Amino acid sequence: RTLHPVTQQFRSRLLEDAYLAWVAHNGIRPLRWALLAMAVIYALFGVLSDQQVTEMHILRFAIVVPSLILVLLVSFTRPFPDFFQRILTLLGVVLLASQVW
C-alpha cells in the first residue's frame, strides 16, 4: 500500500514531499480564484439578506470574509507553499465554525 489508511499520506516521505510540492505549485492559481469567489459570494449573501444586522452579519463581515481575503493575500507570499495545507485546514475550521455558530 502506498497511502496510510487514516492520514491519507504517502508512506514514503520522499513521495509525500514531492506530492505536496506539486499540489502547492499547481493548485495555487485555482485556490486564489476560489478564495476570491468565496469572499465575494459570502459577502453578497450577507448584503442581500433582508435580515437586520445580527450576530451572523458580524461573524460574516468581521471574521469569515476578512479571513478569506487574508489567506488570498498571504497566498502571494514566498513561504505560502510551505504552509499551504495547514492554512487551508485552519480556513476550513473557520468556515465550519461560522456555519455551526
Image (cartoon, grey):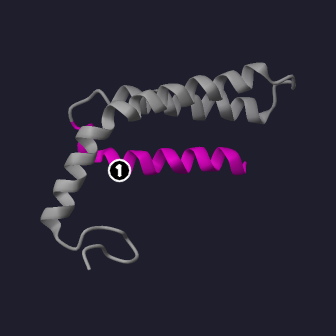
Residue closer to the observer: 73 or 63: 73
Residue 61 falls left or right of residue 18: right
Assign the N terminus to one quadrant of the image: bottom left
Mark count: 1
* Residue occupying image coordinates x 20% and y 48%: 21
Q: Residue furthest front?
A: 1
Q: Is residue 2 above or below residue 91?
A: below
Q: Is residue 98 above or below residue 66?
A: below
* Residue occupying image coordinates x 17% and y 63%: 15
Q: Residue furthest left?
A: 14
Residue 9 falls left or right of residue 48: left
Q: Amino acid at mark 1?
A: Gln
Which residue is the site of mark 1?
85
* Residue occupying image coordinates x 29% and y 27%: 76
Tell me residue 73's x, y (percent): 38, 25
Extent of the magenta region:
79-101
Q: Secondary structure at mark 1?
A: helix
Tell me residue 14's x, y (percent): 12, 64
* Residue occupying image coordinates x 49% and y 25%: 36
Residue closer to the observer: 24 or 79: 24
Q: Is residue 101 above or below residue 74?
A: below
Residue 26 is drawn in which quadrant? top left
Within 10 Å of the Cα at label 1, are there few (<14), some (14-19), or many (20+) other Cα atoms? some
Residue 15 falls left or right of residue 84: left
Tell me residue 61's x, y (percent): 64, 27
